[in-house]
Image: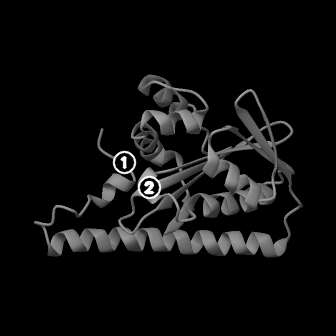
Amino acid sequence: MIIRPLTLYEREAVRHFYLALVPDDRRKRFCCSLSDETISSYVDRLDFSRDTILAAFDEHAQVIGLAELVRGAGAGEMAFSVLPDRRGQRIGTKLLERLLLRARICGIRKVFVMFLSDNTPMRRMASRAGMAISSIDGESHAERDLSAANADDLARWLIEEGFSHSGYFGTLGIAHWGSLLNPCASTSPDPLDAIVPAA
């Protein structure tokens, strides 16, 4: 699995991922039920230069999980979503770990997550990450103070990001050459779909 930050040129990949979520997964991700139009409008407003959007990719360079870190005045808000058939593989946990490191590097001293109280996977992730959790009226709030990043943290992020990018484009190459060698294979995806999926 490859995890790396997305750029503004991959906005359509984010839109495709969120629009493909079934109603209950949309409800758990956004804490309410949203229409296609509302989700699309939300994606249009994402600020890739200010905030961090991490994507987890499978062996075909397809997005299987997303995590967001939005900078606020006093804290950074995080949000997570993983495809149903890929849950139970610690993808959300790995996205959370990378996002916490990113937050520290960005100078954020506190992070929080808002989620519905029946979102058990998110509750478990937050608890394992040492976040303090409180619940009221069907909604939960988890928060954690962060220590300042050091030189080792920065080096770790840069190394992991470098490996992630090289691994991602290597995977794209494998998918591309595999489709050329076996053009009749129905399971070989178009590698460009990972960047700009078809509407």
Residue in the picture at 51% in, 32% down:
44
Q: CA distance from mark 1 to mark 2?
A: 11 Å
Image spot of residue 122 (x, y percent): 65, 49
Q: Amino acid at mark 1?
A: Val
Side (left or right) of 66 relative to 100:
left
Badge 1 or badge 2: first in the primary sequence: 2
Label 1 or label 2, whichever lies nearer to me, is 2
Q: Nearer the viewer, residue 166 or 110?
A: 110
Which quadrant would residue 50 be assigned to in this image? top right
Side (left or right) of 79 relative to 61:
right
Extreme residue toward the left, this view = 184
Image spot of residue 100 (x, y percent): 74, 58
Q: Nearer the viewer, residue 91 or 135?
A: 135
Provide the secondary structure element on which disc 2 rests: strand
Query: In which quadrant of the rendered image does the C terminus lie?
Result: top left
Residue in the picture at 58% in, 72% down:
162
Residue in the picture at 63% in, 39% down:
118
- Which residue is label 2 attached to? 63
